[in-house]
Amino acid sequence: MIYVPYCAILAAFLLIYIPRQVVSAEMKKQEGGYNNNEPRVQQARLEGLGRRAMGAHNNAFEAFAPFAAGVLAAMQRSPQRTVIVATCIAFVVARTIYMVAYLADRANLRSGMWGLGMLAIATLMTLAIIG
């Protein structure tokens, strides 16, 4: 059970790159195919699924650092391992649903899962503070 929080960090890292695969596939569909010379210019022109996948990719980057820091700090400072494990699992589940909801254009579900993910991060940081 002690390894679960570290596996959750790995899972959160992988969740950054799953939507990026969708971005690449959508870029390949554009006129001229994938533009490796100026991919960011091409990404800015994406619409629909490609644009949503880019948003999911970027947001996963934004959530990763606070989550990883929260996990490491909580593991260092808090003896409440069961709570840490449950919170890490909740974060990964929420972020997985978040990604799927973003790709499926389900804004309300996406926003709710974003909130749960942020609550998980706040919980981990609080556990680190209170010990």
Image (cartoon, rainbow, N blue to C red):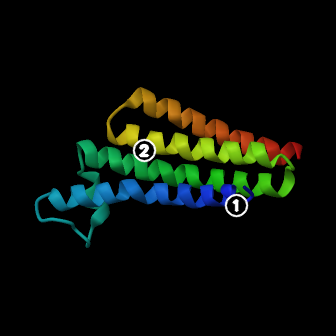
State the residue at coordinates (33%, 59%).
Answer: 21
**Circle 2: is it few (<14), some (14-19), or many (20+) Cα within 10 Å?**
many
Q: In this view, does 30 lie to the left or right of 13?
A: left
State the residue at coordinates (48%, 45%).
Answer: 96
Q: In the image shown, does 7 or 34 lie closer to the viewer?
A: 7
Q: Which residue lies furthest to the bottom in this view?
A: 37
Residue type at tag 2: Met
Q: Position of residue 110 (x, y in %)?
A: 44, 34
Q: How many labels does the image show?
A: 2
In the rendered image, the quadrant that contains the N terminus is bottom right
Q: Does residue 101 sit above or below 68 in this rendering?
A: above
Q: Which mark is residue 55?
A: none
Q: In this view, does 131 lie to the left or right of 56?
A: right
Quickly name the residue at label 2: 99
Q: Is residue 104 left or right of residue 66?
A: left
Displayed quadrant of residue 12: bottom right
Q: Are marks 1 and 2 in contact (CB under 8 Å)?
A: no
Residue type at tag 1: Tyr
Q: Which residue lies furthest to the left in this view?
A: 31
Q: Is residue 100 left or right of residue 73?
A: left
Q: Position of residue 72 (x, y in %)?
A: 74, 58
Label 2: which secondary element: helix
Q: Position of residue 45 (x, y in %)?
A: 23, 51
Q: Position of residue 69 (x, y in %)?
A: 70, 56
Quickly name the residue at label 1: 3
Label 1: which secondary element: loop
State the residue at coordinates (79%, 41%).
Answer: 126
Q: In the image shown, does 117 or 39 lie closer to the viewer?
A: 117
How far is mark 1 from mark 2, CA to CA? Answer: 24 Å
